[in-house]
Amino acid sequence: MSGLSIENVSMRFDLPNGTSVQALKDVSLHLNEGELMSVLGPSGCGKTTLLNIIAGFLAPTEGEIVLNHHKVVGPNAERGMVFQQGALFEWMDVRDNVSFGPRMKRQKEAEWGEYVDHLLAVTGLAEFKDKAIYELSGGMQQRVALARCLANDPDVILMDEPLGALDALTREKMQGLVLKLWKETGKTIILITHSVEEAVLLGERLVVMAPRPGRIHKEYRLPFADMGVGADLREVKHANGYAETREEILEMIWDMEEEIMGRTEAQQ
Amino acid sequence: MIGFAILLVYIAIFAGSFLAVRFLVRKTTRDFTALKTVTFGDESAVSANRIASVVSVVTIFLIWGSFTGSAWVPGFLHAPGPFVGDTSFSYTSEAPDGRRDDATVFVRVVGFGEPTEKFEVDPGAGFAHDDAVSMPASRSSTILFDKNDEITRKDGAHIIAIDGKPIMPGGELRTDAGRFVLTEKGAISFSPPAGLQMEPIWLPPPERVVERVVEIASEGYRGSTLWQHLGYSLFRVIAGFFFGALLGIPLGYAMGLSDWFRGWFEPIVEFMRPVPPLALIPLVIIWFGIGETGKIILLFLASLWIMAISARAGVSGVNISKVHAAYSLGASKSQIMRHVIMPNSLPEIFTGARVAMGVCWGTVVAAELVAASEGAGMMIMVASKFQLTDIVLMGIILIGVIGFGIDILMRKAENFLVPWKGRS
Ligand SMILES: Nc1ncnc2c1ncn2[C@@H]1O[C@H](COP(=O)(O)OP(=O)(O)OP(=O)(O)O)[C@@H](O)[C@H]1O
Ligand SMILES: [Mg+2]
């Protein structure tokens, strides 16, 4: 099966004080090529852990990740990552950041120059390409991070709350951009977010995770991402079923949070 | 006494210029800070007042010139100088048989650094004869008034009054001429008014220091010109720092990247870090002598630990997201080293380099104070043995200026090479 398979992945952190945290338990998922899946869940349910395992930064205690018939054993250029912030290289200008991947593969500028400039244009960074990173706003920095990931042409793009630090307006524009780039490039994307609205809007598939131990609670297949490509995202929010789905998921996560709070209160 | 006067003048100028500038200079800056209503407690709203800096430096030179009678400071700003010139007082001697006689002592007070000159006066009538004494300014002189008298202290004569005012042995008296103390043995100790100025042997006026700079720059001191002395010190610092950085930075990287290196070197670095380089001077002299090798090794050791620690801090300070991002963009270990870890550690390394340069500069001067045949420290040490205060001051000022210059250069280089420092 081509695509990305998460097969019975469990992750246990053994703490120095002898106890251990079961961050993930028996998580299985399959993503076809070109699917966009958003992941939701209360804080501490193992979303970041799962993403780090897929990226290859962590080895799971059980199970494995298989991408296009190969077992994942470490970080690799076929799985790109977009971090929330602080992952850009301040000592390079915008264009050098975006072309980092190809340059590390020792490709000549003739090979990547055109595509990098195209990405800079699509993300609206063309006139800032010679600027230093610290001269950019937060939204621009996230566009650089997105372009940098795409320039490397990975098979899978992993995003951990990439828009979490942005203001509402910038965030909305970036959501449109993510959808546009997704359709244009046909990449497989996993997007972690805390915003239910964003998850419903962008996720062709949506996974809600539950905590303690971290596991998949519910899966959805949603039409809104396809509707949103090239359209006004605010219109999509009025589409049939959007509000209902959003409310249902909000309720679900709310209940889980309540339960966590209740449990900690009971412990005290 | 002088110290107290200087402190008062300094505080007066500080407060006076503050009020004057406040009154005269309207705040004309229209930048963002000018619009802040909360400035007290907002550190970013505090920037050095340049007028204050200029007045501060001018004040130091003014006080220096004023209390040393400098030719560069107009006379009316001079602190009262010591009495110089001719003065006289009379004493009344009483013979054992009760006879009394007055005699005058003529005193010629010569200025700082001038030779005293003997002169003669007419002895006058009576058994007490007039005396002539020459003495340096701002000092006390014991006057053996009865040397030329017909009835001396040995014969039983003793002083009962000076300038008509009675005085006893051990007693003290002040007149317009100055201060008199009658010693237990009955001699007169006379101090003309000392004023508030410093003697050049303690603090020479600024022009004397500048003259010394010119003189030593052209003629040299102890076999080397001024520039050779300073050049030697600077060369040692740069050589020592160069080798310290050359070894220290890779060492710090290794400690930041490998368990084994960190485990191996941590006890050594942690042990050596708190040992002040000055404490190593005796050992270095025993091992390597007082030549260049010893000095450079000392400075190498002084900068090695600082550079190693800052390079290690630079590596551990790298945001793990950057490393992860680089790996998932396909970078190899050596590429991560070259394109992520090294540039990311540059700000820390520059901070370390500035500290190391400062420590090296201080250490080299101290090492030269102990033993050297040339160098800034050696210059002031030898000069102090001969009480050449002007050379000592010149050396201290030049050492300060050079140290300051080094730091400014390092900061300029830092702004140029790591413009992102503190901005991410
Ligand atoms: N390195 C680690 N050592 C020990 N425990 C860890 C480690 N990393 C994560 N955990 C634990 O694993 C659990 C899941 O963490 P994770 O960061 O994946 O949550 P998350 O869903 O990403 O939360 P958030 O939404 O707040 O980012 C948490 O209970 C956390 O305490
Ligand atoms: Mg997380």
Image (cartoon, rainbow, N blue to C red):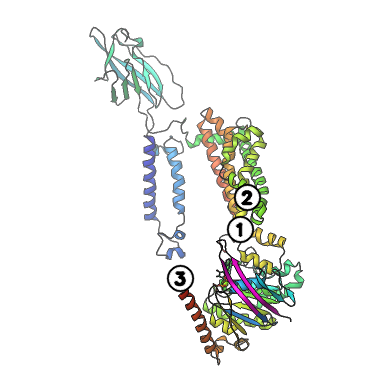
Q: Residues within 10 Å of mark 2 (few under 14, many from 20)?
A: many
Q: Which residue is mark 2?
A: B308
The alpha-carbon separation of the residues under discs 3 and 2 comes to: 47 Å
For the residues labelled 3 and 1, the Cα–Cα distance comes to 37 Å
Residue A115 image offset from top left, x and y in percent: 72, 75
Which quadrant of the figure shows ligand 1? Answer: bottom right
Vertical position of residue A176 compared to residue B367: above or below:
below
Q: Which residue is mark 1?
A: B316
Can residue A144 be seen by looking at this rendering?
A: no
Q: Are marks 3 and 2 in contact (CB under 8 Å)?
A: no
Label 3: which residue? A267
Whether residue B13 is situated above or below residue B258 in the rendered picture:
above
Q: What amino acid type should be assigned to the residue bearing mark 2? A: Ala
Residue type, numbered disc 3:
Gln
Q: Chain of mark 3?
A: A
Along the line of sight, the residue nearer the viewer: B251 or A126: B251
The single residue placed furthest to the bottom in the displayed view is A240
**How far apart in space, not on screen, are marks 1 and 2 (Cα)?**
12 Å
- Which span is picked out in magenta? A1-28
Q: Quadrant of the C terminus of chain B?
A: bottom right
Task: Assign a secondary structure to mark 2.
Answer: helix
Q: Nearer the viewer, mark 3 or mark 1?
A: 3
| Image quarter of residue B140 | top left
* Chain of the residue under label 2: B
For the image, the number of numbered tags is: 3
